[in-house]
Image: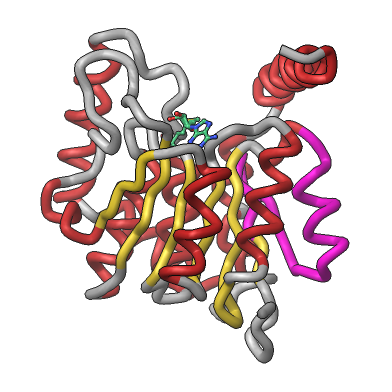
Amino acid sequence: MTVRGTLRDAIYAVRKARLRLERRRLDYGRETRDRAERLSEILPASVAELRGYEREYEDLEWFHDTYADRVAEIHETGVAADTTHWRDGATLYVVCRALEVETAVETGVLFGSFDAHVLAAMERNGGGTLHAVDLPGGPPGRFDYGHLIPDRCRDRWELHRGDARDVVPELLEAVGPVDLFLHDSDHRLPHMRFEYETALSHLEAGGVLASHDVRLSRLFDRFTDANDLPACVVCDTGIARVSSSEGTE
Ligand SMILES: C[S@@+](CC[C@H](N)C(=O)[O-])C[C@H]1O[C@@H](n2cnc3c(N)ncnc32)[C@H](O)[C@@H]1O
């Protein structure tokens, strides 16, 4: 590894340690309570409509039964460290319902918490495809990528194996413009920046750029400011939206 690579990894390790501390201080109850208000600032939906999608999510018994069983299964084997929390998944559920997202690309699948939530929203929308990208191989333990995805949503899910740096540009060319691009793969800054920049030129007018772990650095805020994208952060997920009157291509 080069000196620059070693330095980058060291900086990333410090950022992650700082994030762990920040998460302990963050009031997640308040974050969740404020979700609808924050999203209403950037989505074409009222607070009442967004709260309606939150309630709909809470009432999705077929989803929660499978999700809870499979989370427990993964936890029992002791390998679930990096699974994205359901409250971030719920934010994506609300976004996908409010925008009736049809075509989405996501990087970083692991057990598929985000995937399960996006796909549940597509199921309620009555259509849609989620293209998901992760490295060759699979998650730790005896599980496959996307283990948390309920069986009834699987036919809307297409897994693409490979480094996002190689796969995403061609994938976006092939399936874009997309209504949603969601980053949750390699959180080192050059990679995040690469994904944000690549995605931005392939978003549908009114589409969303979402990113997990935006509290690791100021990158998401700086990127959305520099590109004039209205944005908010709920829990650990950043949501930004391109103008609905003009695409970015
Ligand atoms: C934090 S986990 C993703 C969690 C997942 N989104 C969820 O909802 O539970 C990060 C994932 O990104 C994948 N990953 C890391 N670097 C990548 C890259 N360069 N290209 C594609 N996937 C990558 C890892 O293999 C891992 O599965």
Where is the C terminus found, in terms of image quarters? Answer: bottom right
In the image, residue 22 lies at what x, y percent? 73, 24
At x 58% / y 72%, what residue is drawn? 203
Residue 119 quadrant:
bottom left
Where residue 173 sits in the image (x, y, percent)? 50, 68
29, above or below 204, in the image: above
Q: Position of residue 111 (x, y in %)?
A: 33, 32
Name the colour scheme.
Answer: secondary structure
Instruction: Give the residues drawn in magenta, as a range.
Output: 217-239
Residue lying at 45% horizontally and 60% vertically, measured from the top left:
171
Q: Judge whether 69 appears above or below 90 on screen.
A: above
Instruction: Give the left or right position of residue 176, taking residue 228 as reference.
Output: left
Q: Count up the numbered dots.
A: 0
* Picture coordinates of residue 133, whole percent (x, y): 42, 45
The correct choice, above or below, for 103 with respect to 144 in the image is below
Please give the name of the residue rendered at 51% of the width and 75% of the height, measured from the top-left corner: 177
Q: Is residue 221 magenta?
A: yes
Above-or-below relation of 153 to 213: below
- In the rendered structure, the answer to whether residue 32 lies left or right of residue 67 reads right
Is residue 58 visible to the viewer in this orientation of the structure? Answer: yes
- Tell me what residue is drawn at x 58 percent, y 42 percent: 212
Left or right: where does residue 201 sit relative to residue 166?
right
Where, quadrant-wise, is the N terminus in this rendering? top right
**Residue 18 in sight here:** no
Q: Nearer the viewer, residue 52 or 89?
A: 89
